[in-house]
Image (spheres, rainbow, N blue to C red):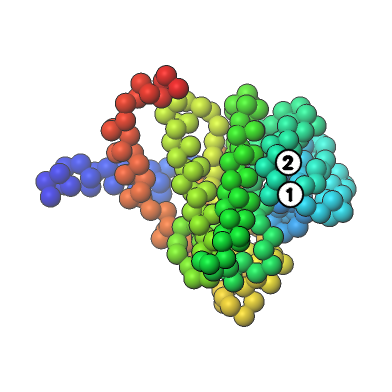
Amino acid sequence: MAFMKKYLLPILGIFLAYYYYSAKEEFRPEMLRGKRVIVTGASKGIGREMAYHLARMGAHVVVTARSEEALKKVVSHCLELGASSAHYVAGTMENMTFAEQFVAKAGKLMGGLDMLILNHITSSNNPMTVFINDIDQVRKNMEVNFLSYVVLSGAAMPMLKQSNGSIVVVSSIAGKTANPLVAAYSASKFALDGFFSSIRVEYAVTNVNVSITLCILGLIETETAMTGTAGIYNAEASPKEECALEIIKGGALRQKEVYYDSSVLTLFLLGNPGRKILEFLSLRNYNMEIFIKN
């Protein structure tokens, strides 16, 4: 009890005060003007809306998804909206070789990279019917929703280090809380949190100036989400256009986490200052020379 009063409570107070009251930089659309941005899963839904927002802001955009015809339309509209440049590369993130080669091609098209937005998910017809004995779907969720994100980030890292850029990872409340009927999807999203949050700490310790923003989304009004949850899950869906903009803002401001949901309680309940305190305290147990050598 004495330890708690002397150390933990003051630390908790400092963390909460910083988290809720520290001054935050205000987002300005010109932050993205001329920036070189990749958006995955951009043929529809949130990804397509992010591409359109970035185009209006004057960014260079390279989009990818499986549908070449849909991507052609997205690129055409991006140019109409004012993108500095817009290109597409069609392919599937089930193919890790394509994922790695795509980043290299996008970098050549734009002459580098400032922001990598990872937004794609597996094309399961109904993700809310994947159960524990469906190993093929579990594997597909982990490979597409998680492993391809790691491959893309690794391929992009040399360019992002050079530009002091950003990785934006689109995740879900299902990657923070347990929910029925989405075990495979949820596992892939929990994996994103564990991997990219750990990498963020490593970068902070080793002074790598590449930000990592994890975006935790609730139910968003996209065709895929509405179809997948129809008759199963009843909750208010948030607009995809506004969601897309909030994701871009979070990446531009280099925020650690972005919460976007119809419930105002989401940030308060999932912000979890206890986890942040434990992560901070756990660093005391590491030999910092290990990071310097690596």
Amino acid type at mark 1: Thr
Instruction: Look at the picture and state if 18 lies above or below 183.
Output: above
* Residue sitting at the far bottom: 231
- CA distance for labels 1 and 2: 7 Å
Residue lying farthest top? Answer: 293
- From this viewpoint, is residue 245 visible? no
What residue would you read off at disc 1?
Answer: 92
**Residue 141 placed where, x, y %?**
60, 56
Who is closer to the viewer here, 255 or 155? 155
Is residue 65 left or right of 240 when viewed as pictured?
right
Q: Do the residues labelled 1 and 2 touch (CB within 8 Å)?
A: yes
Q: In the rendered view of the protein, which quadrant contains the C terminus?
A: top left
- Judging by the rendered image, the residue that carries numbered circle 2 is 98
Tally of numbered discs: 2
The residue closer to the viewer here, 269 or 45, is 45
Q: Position of residue 13 (x, y in %)?
A: 29, 46
Q: Quadrant of residue 27?
A: top right
Residue drawn at (78%, 52%) of the image: 66
* Quadrant in the picture for residue 184: bottom right
Mark 2 Cα shell of 10 Å, populated few (<14), some (14-19), many (≥20): some
Instruction: Give left or right: position of 257 versus 53.
Output: left
The residue shown at (59%, 71%) is 129
What secondary structure is marked by label 2?
helix
Looking at the picture, does residue 130 appear above or below residue 80? below
Residue 287 is situated, as x and y percent measured from the top left of the image, at: 32, 26
Q: What residue type is labelled 2?
A: Phe
